[in-house]
Image: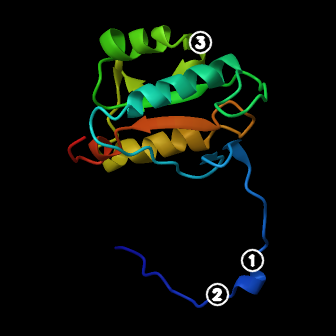
Amino acid sequence: MQKERELQIKYYDKVASRKVDWLWYPYIPYGKITIVQGDPGDGKSTFLLNLSALLTLGKPLPGSSEEREPTVVIYQNAEDGIEDTIKPRLESVGADCSKVAYLGNGGQSITLSEDSDCKEFGEIIGDRPCSGLYRRCGYEPSKRYKGGDG
């Protein structure tokens, strides 16, 4: 039996304001969902793979000169093969592949098309402290993960 929600009117004077912590100002904040959307062939994968390379190497992001600590990136892709597409693309952009992870089952990337996959993914990521290791995740294409067409 599903528990009924009890909606309440809340007031903003009870909300504590806080600054946004940015991975890449003003594009990608930490702790928020960032969607990279576009038509097929627009370069979404290329963008995310290049961003992953910069993060894993600790290099400055475009428009910045700020060096950063190399970090682990979780790159989840539901369309492309791990061995024949994703890994070669990561290598071609110079990513440190020892710092690029994916969630998989038996050598295959999980699709997150089932609610149980999404729940398990959230539990795995949620178990990690925000110590810098898993602060940026790239998921694409998002429709594919919820059972739509990419």
Given contact means CB atoms under 8 Å apart, are the residues at marks 2 and 1 in contact? yes
Q: Quadrant of the N terminus?
A: bottom left
Mark carried by residue 96:
3
Q: Which amino acid is tagged 1? A: Val
Mark carried by residue 15:
1
- Residue 92, given in percent of the width and then of the height, sits at 46, 9
Q: Residues within 10 Å of mark 1 (few under 14, many from 20)?
A: few
The kind of secondary structure element at disc 2 is: loop
Viewer-proximal residue among 115 and 147: 147
Residue carrying label 2 = 10
Q: Residues within 10 Å of mark 2 (few under 14, many from 20)?
A: few
Q: Residue at x 65, y 49 (%)?
A: 26
Q: Which amino acid is tagged 3? A: Asp
Q: Residue at x 29, y 48 (%)?
A: 146
Of labels 1 and 3, earlier in sequence is: 1
Relative to residue 143, is residue 18 depicted above or below?
A: below
Q: Residue at x 33, y 50 (%)?
A: 115
Of labels 3 and 2, earlier in sequence is: 2
